[in-house]
Amino acid sequence: MYTSHEDVGYDFEDDPKDKKTLKPHPNIDGGWAWMMVLSSFFVHILIMGSQMALGVLNVEWLEEFHQSRGLTAWVSSLSMGVTLIVGPFIGLFINTCGCRQTAIIGGLLNSLGWVLSAYAGNVHYLFITFGVAAGFGSGMAYLPAVVMVGRYFQKRRALAQGLSTTGTGFGTFLMTVLLKYLCAEYGWRNAMFIQGAVSLNLCVCGALMRPLSPGTDGDDPEGKEPHVLPAHSTESVRSSGQLGGAEEKGGGPGTEDSLGDTPAQACHEKAAHRKDVCAFRVLKTVSRLTVRVRKGFRDWYLGYFGTASLFTNRMFVAFIFWALFAYSSFVIPFIHLPEIVNLYNLSEQNDVFPLTSIIAIVHIFGKVILGVVADLPCISVWNVFLMTNFTLVLSIFILPLMHTYAGLAVICALIGFSSGYFSLMPVVTEDLVGIEHLANAYGIIICANGISALLGPPFAGWIYDITQKYDFSFYICGLLYMVGILFLLIQPCIQIIEQSRKKYMNGANA
């Protein structure tokens, strides 16, 4: 789905026969591939980690702007939601510009969003600078990090993706501590300014995303502009021919005048030649860019709008419905737990070891352990996926009942471990739609998760504004999450019933 001029490694010429054939690259499953894992790991730290730590800033914004919790929560949810929702559209940038340029531009945009947010005078200003600008930049840097790991690995792809995504847990722990320290020492505005400078490291991560190139010229993956040999224009060739003919004839009344004008004529021809070469290079660059944009848009369009058959798969549609409610149950605790702790007068204990850090740390182990268990030959990935979902729903229902730090810590550990099922989502998606539709289907699932992340935190804030409690928001989100899981359970039963009915009807007709 995400193919580009840069990543494929050949030039777009007028004749398709001139394209280079791709050869196995020595960096596949080794060499520079592990730099891709390292780059993606730090991208997850800087993007997903910082977003999961936004609960610290949410408390500061509530105190600064004195707005409702529902309105203030839109800042964090916009940043999270836009990062995931724009995923399918970032594919257009990847197809056109390549992963490296897309990630670098995303890093610059993300950093700019953080810096501009430091000068916010109201919440609505943060909607644009932090929610939209920083969120869009995060999406531009996040998707290339995932795509490049997949391109550099074949045999160890699952291991590589698992190692890179653990950056989310590490980042949540590190960024929570960092933002709490910066807010306490320098204030939230200076903290966002400093975080903007830290986010510039996304450009470094993007620069490491060296595209694969065929052959032995892998050290120069970007390719070089082909050297254009000097070529005389038609006018210069004609003039040279006429001049040569005059010299051969040797005599004539105009021979001396022609020889006297030779230096001026040569300078004129050189200037015309330079203009012709510059114009040729400009036209060639514009032509290549036009072809690249057209091909990138065609690949992007066919990748997402040419797969309508996905939506005829009832299980996949049920999976989309599940994704619309699943991610909010994971995001809401990160955004609102810092304030819940303040309401329960547990700030001192939470400052020693934040509850969000507990979720982040256990989340790392959950991904690794669940991945190992799901790979066992006697274990069904689908059963592991459903069991962890039920555990997460149960934790969401129990969370409002806990009013002590120890009780909240246990529930947060359960949330962190059970949410490790995110590492199983690509496997489950492949089982539902097949390997040929995996990329497109997973992009749709991520977009649905983005909608869930966008609407979940503001919904919880609105419920608090109405009831002065967060309890009902957890109950409602947990109930919707349970409905999504039931859809996943009911669809196989419906398919079995329909297959049995068809067999019965066929037997009766026979």
Image (spheres, rainbow, N blue to C red):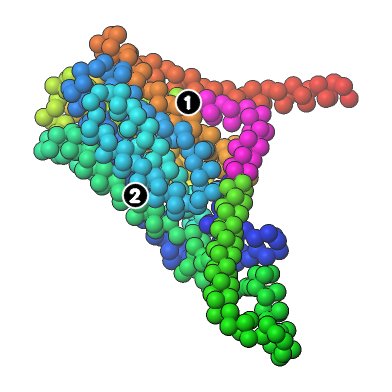
Quarter of the image with the C terminus in it: top right
Sequence-first disc among 2 and 1 = 2
> Disc 1 marks which residue?
324
Label 2 is placed on what type of residue?
Answer: Leu
Residue 125 in percent (x, y) is at: 30, 26
Give the image quarter of residue 434. Answer: top right
Question: In this view, which residue lies farthest toward the front?
Answer: 253
| Tag 2 and tag 1, C-beta contact below 8 Å | no
Residue 428 in percent (x, y) is at: 53, 38
Give the image quarter of residue 417. Answer: top left
Q: Which residues are magenta?
A: 296-323
Label 1 is placed on what type of residue?
Answer: Leu
Residue 358, visible in the rendered structure: no
Residue 247 in percent (x, y) is at: 69, 87
Mark 1 lies on a secondary structure that is helix
> Disc 2 marks which residue?
202
Residue drawn at x 30%, y 28% is 126
Q: Is residue 382 magenta?
A: no
Give the image quarter of residue 302. Answer: top right
Residue drawn at x 49%, y 29% is 448
Residue 129 in percent (x, y) is at: 32, 32
Picture layout, residue 27 above or below residue 48: below
Asked whether 273 or 486 is in front, the reply is: 273
Left or right: where does residue 158 sit relative to residue 15? left
Residue drawn at x 30%, y 8% is 466
Picture layout, residue 121 above or below residue 304: above
Q: Is residue 306 magenta?
A: yes
Picture layout, residue 346 above or below residue 114: above
- Distance in Å between CA atoms under marks 2 and 1: 29 Å
